[in-house]
Image: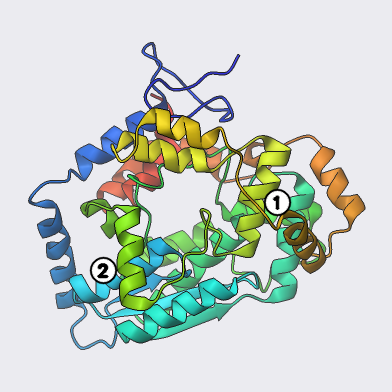
Amino acid sequence: MEKICNRCVSNSSINSLNLDINGICQFCKIHDEMEAEYPLNENSFKELLKISDRIKEEGKGKKFDCVVGVSGGKDSSYLLYLVKEKLKLRPLAVHYDNGFDSDTSVSNILRVCEKLDVELETKVADWEKFKDITRAFFLAGVSDPDTPTDVGIFKSMYEVAYKEKIKYVFNGHSFRTEGIEPLDWTYMDGLYVKDINKKFGKSSLDKFDNFELKDLIKYNFINGIQTILPLNYIEYNQEKVIKILQENFDWINYGGHHHESLLTKFVVSYYLPKKFGIDRRRTGLSALVRSGQIKREEAIEILNVPPILNDGVELKNYILDKLDISEEDFRLIMSQKNKNFKNFTTYYNFFKNFKFFAKIFYKLKFIPKILYLRYFGGDY
């Protein structure tokens, strides 16, 4: 029997779903804790301006005072606009090219950066290494084969910030629109990457942009680089954001959630629904329900229609060919037992044993609260 939250649309496709006596899930409670931390009122944007004023002061004399990661998607494109035009900061845009950028995403990045007069630095992944570790994730049968991309993005932003002596990295996540991705759906951890590579990869990770515990210590604790999530301080409406981007930058809408990357488009719209019964739209729709942007019934109605992928066969063939995965190997991948990070060596248990210190780290702004709650907020 399917379990579903009485408030949002989180359901038993999330193995770790935990409903209280009122049928409310842990993700709703994390949302409420974030709302308490970042309430939307007349002071919200003023708080963001205080942060930007501090960044300006600390960045005096430097060419850039912050790093903004860009993908060509709506969130990162709007974030760059907000940082440059509304907060009047001097951002350096950083893009991680994993070899799967769509033409639309590339044109969006170039347009937005050019019209905002923002310098762009692109980190191009070592293709052979990236291909090997991404293929290894598919062969491992886990639900997050785009984790190497997420790790590469994270490492690139911090690497550039460190090189340029910048103390602030801006992230375009909004808990009110994207929600909290369950750990058993998608997990990011340098040790996790190493273990999967050891068991399913063909080469070392020497040239891969991995992010390990030593990197966290180097960038965050020793050099004091902080992650800022400005979209938490503003009323973020996706339809309005798309209109602003289209009117100001001729920004092109690429369609589905995270379809700016061909790899992620394949993962969320083909691989996850067919192999795991996972519909990643569920987390974003749950967030929109919690924040009052849509009704729960409307979200359920949307989810009743499977993700639309008109070019599914062509996209699958493109991804398999690019990753050197044969049709036979892919059939084995799709039929083997489903796995996730819990089947591999990770930092997870280590972090769980130091929950108290993790709380101190987020209080000191070394890690964002949403990251702390994602890893430690499931015990409600």
Q: Residues within 10 Å of mark 2 (few under 14, many from 20)?
A: some
2 vs 1, front mark: 2
Cα separation, mark 2 vs mark 1, equals 39 Å
Query: In the picture provided, is 269 more to the left or to the right than 156?
Result: right
To which residue does mark 1 refer?
195
Where does the image place residue 98, in percent across and percent down from the top left? 62, 71
Judged from this view, the residue extending furthest toward the top is 21
Amino acid tagged 2: Leu
Where does the image place residue 376, in percent across and percent down from the top left? 42, 36
Confirm whether residue 226 shows in the render: no
Q: Quadrant of the N terminus?
A: top right
At x 69%, y 68%, the residue is 130
Where does the image place residue 87, in percent across and percent down from the top left? 19, 71
Query: In the picture provided, is 42 more to the left or to the right than 242?
Result: left
The quarter of the picture where residue 374 lies is top left
Depth check, front residue: 278 or 246: 246
To which residue does mark 2 refer?
82
